[in-house]
């Protein structure tokens, strides 16, 4: 199908993809809702996408839980979603796990996470 020419067409196609349980579309809609300030909808879309295995949604949820945006701060859930994103190959999630492990005194684990993040392309993990 041709690329959408208007925002309306784009949103229509996005909603069709969401109705078809496309986790990428759900993650995209979660980002849109977050930017609009509809945090409840953003959280719902990101959660649905994460349940379906979307790595980016797991990463975004980890940030939301860590920072207490849209949801109550919850380090345990933040860690869970960061781990899921890292397992899925998300370089920044892996980098964030390295920082967390370092802060918790697990220096060897932190180093391992940093090396993996660097191999995934996150150059700042080498700093």
Image (cartoon, rainbow, N blue to C red):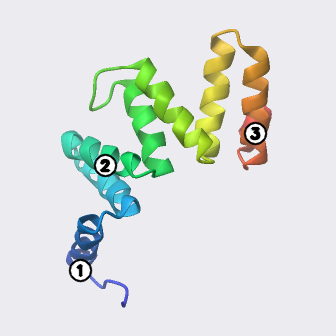
Cα distance between the residues tagged 1 and 3? 40 Å
Q: In terms of depth relative to the viewer, which is nearer, 7 or 63?
A: 63
Label 1 sits on residue: 9
**Point 28% across, 50% down: residue:** 45
Quadrant location of the C terminus in the rendered image: top right
The answer to whether mark 2 and mark 1 are in CB contact below 8 A is no
Cα distance between the residues tagged 3 and 2? 27 Å
Quadrant location of the N terminus in the rendered image: bottom left
Where residue 102 sits in the image (x, y, percent)?
A: 69, 16
Of marks 1 and 3, the one in the foreground: 3
- Identify the mark at residue 48; answer none if there is no mark: 2
Q: In terms of depth relative to the viewer, which is nearer, 95 or 53?
A: 53
Where residue 57 sits in the image (x, y, percent)?
A: 42, 47
Q: Quadrant of residue 86?
A: top right
Cα distance between the residues tagged 2 and 1? 23 Å
Label 3 sits on residue: 116
**Point 77% across, 42% down: residue:** 118
SS at badge 3: helix
Of marks 3 and 2, the one in the foreground: 2
């Amino acid at each position: 199908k041709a690329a959408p020419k208007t925002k309306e067409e784009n949103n229509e196609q996005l909603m069709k993809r969401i109705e078809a349980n496309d986790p990428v579309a759900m993650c995209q809609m979660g980002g849109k809702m977050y930017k609009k300030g509809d945090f409840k909808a953003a959280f719902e879309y990101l959660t649905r996408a994460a349940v379906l295995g979307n790595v980016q949604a797991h990463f975004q949820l980890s940030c939301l839980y860590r920072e207490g945006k849209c949801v109550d701060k919850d380090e345990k859930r933040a860690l869970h979603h960061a781990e899921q994103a890292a397992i899925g190959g998300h370089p920044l999630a892996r980098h964030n796990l390295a920082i967390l492990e370092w802060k918790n005194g697990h220096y060897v684990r932190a180093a391992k996470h940093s090396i993996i993040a660097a191999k995934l392309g996150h150059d700042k993990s080498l700093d």
